[in-house]
Image: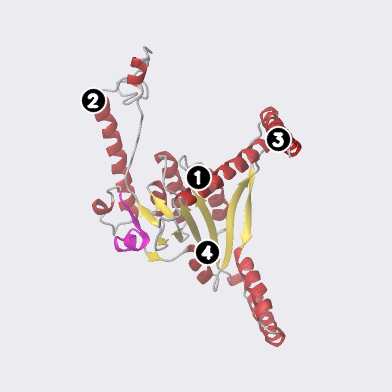
Amino acid sequence: MAFLFEYGLFLAKTVTIIFGIAVVIILMVGASSKPKSKKGEIEVTDLSDSLAQSKEQFLEQTLDKKALKARNKAQSKEQKSKGENKEDTKNVFYIEFNGSMDAHEVSDLREEINAILMIADKATDQVIVSVESGGGVVHGYGLGASQLSRIKQAGIPLTVCVDKVAASGGYMMACVADKIIAAPFAIIGSIGVIAQIPNFNRLLKKNNVDFEMVTAGEYKRTLTLFGENTDKGREKFKEEIEETHGLFKHFVSDNRTELDIEKVATGEHWFGTQALELKLVDEISTSDDLLMSLNESHQLYKVAYKTKKGVAEKFGLQLGLAIERFSVKALTKLNQSKY
């Protein structure tokens, strides 16, 4: 028994060492490799074909041979008819935007919109964007909203779907659309601005640490992390936040003219059904329902811009996903008795 214990301990140590060496090698390879421009490519997925394949697979397992044969015959005639009228095809271009705090995903969104605008026909085609974001930096989401505005400026109908959350910067992007569709429990709104800055000045003073900051311009820095903040600086910082909020409100009201902007621009958020009553959204549904309904009369394409990732970046991504899964499992166990 002691031998097995010692052997198990030795094996665990060996695996740990090998894993550690592998991590170091991967990081070294990633660091030593020459930085390359992150050129990607547009990937187009035929969603109509994917839906058709799923339907066929299901029917093949549920219909008897006679019914399946009759259906295939009818379908052949239908496909022939569609082929003859192919020039009349109306397209739907679908984009998924999952935004983070720094809104770096906007660069991919730009590429996707560029590709669509080069081929879309404003007379027949339309664009659907699924937005999922709790917001983030003002300039990032402002640019994201401007990218979506390009679709409208090109005369192409734009619909934004919110299945989970479009709050703050996420709603700034959503409000640009001709129509906003939200799931019943999607989180909508949060038309407000927040800035949080910790200050360590008292801690530095307590430990006899001096902090020097040299600026040119009275308000180059209003509040700082390490300096001693003043009431004048706080007032200026608050003024800047209010100005940003004012611009946010103005932007939303310009795009959603039917809104009572003072009622909804309080920083609060609402669920989809409540947002419909407040006219923050136009319809209650999901992106899946919308796409399936349009599939009856349109050809659906999903458009995504993909960049190639290096070895170190792939490893970091996988490590991040593993930590995220572990965290979710831990939180689920802690809150399993809660709604």
* x 68%, y 38%: residue: 311
Pick out the residue farthest to the front. 1
The mark that comes first in sequence, 4 or 1, is 1
Give the CA separation, mark 2 to mark 4. Answer: 55 Å
Q: Which residue is mark 1?
A: 106
In this picture, which residue range is highlighted in magenta?
268-281
Residue 231: which disc?
A: 2
**Helix, strand or loop at disc 3?**
helix
**Labels 2 & 4 near each other (Cβ < 8 A):** no
Instruction: Please determine whether, in this image, residue 50 is positioned above or below residue 1.
Output: below
Going by the image, does 300 lie left or right of 142?
A: right
Q: Which residue is mark 3?
A: 9
**Labels 4 & 1 near each other (Cβ < 8 A):** no
**Helix, strand or loop at disc 1?**
helix
Residue 125: which disc?
A: 4
Give the CA separation, mark 1 to mark 2. Answer: 37 Å
Q: Quadrant of the N terminus?
A: top right
